[in-house]
Amino acid sequence: MMMMNGGNTTMGMPRRKKMMMHMTFYWGKDALILFTGWPGVDNTGMYVLALFFVFFLAIIVEWLAHCNAVMMKSNGVASTLAQTLVYTIRVGLGFMVMLALMSFNFGVFLTAVLGHALGFFFFRVIMRSSEHQDVVSTAC
């Protein structure tokens, strides 16, 4: 017969502290973003780091979209393989942003949207202006 040890075990198995997963948008720093235990409960610094990570991930996704658009001007097998590689990385990172959004944390949502907006503005509006055409081809 198994004995319970002060409420810390159930049937011989240790209990884990469970974090609540939200199914609607919420405000708060207690979130689970991308990895188990990250940023953690009551850890404001790690939450801010997670927001910066999602922000820069969204900017990188927009930069890779820009690079793919620039590479579309080239033809050939090597160019097509490079475009495929950049596209694959962009889709993978985009899925990571989407998974971060599935934390349903409103701060993560705003950070991802702002990252995509800033990336789009910088790489598609500013970099495509006529005065930066030399930079466009070397930015990737």
Image (cartoon, helix red, strand yellow):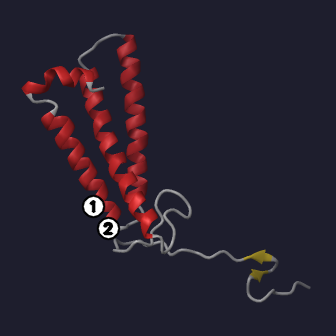
Amino acid of disc 2: Phe
The correct choice, above or below, for 134 with respect to 76 in the image is below
Residue that appears at 40% across and 52% down:
53
The reply to whether dot 2 and dot 1 touch (C-beta < 8 Å) is yes
Q: Quadrant of the N terminus?
A: bottom right
12 relative position to 99: left or right: right
Q: Position of residue 84 (x, y in %)?
A: 39, 25
Residue at the spot of label 2: 106
Could you give the CA–CA distance between mark 2 and mark 1, rounded to whole angstroms?
Answer: 6 Å
Q: Quick one: SS at disc 2?
A: helix
Provide residue 94's location: percent of width, then percent of height.
37, 45
Q: Where residue 131 sits: x, y (%)?
A: 8, 25
Number of callouts:
2
Task: Return the x and y of residue 122 as percentages of the image width and height.
Answer: 19, 40
Q: Residue furthest top?
A: 76
The 10 Å Cα crowd at callout 1, few under 14, some 14 to 19, many 20 or more, is some
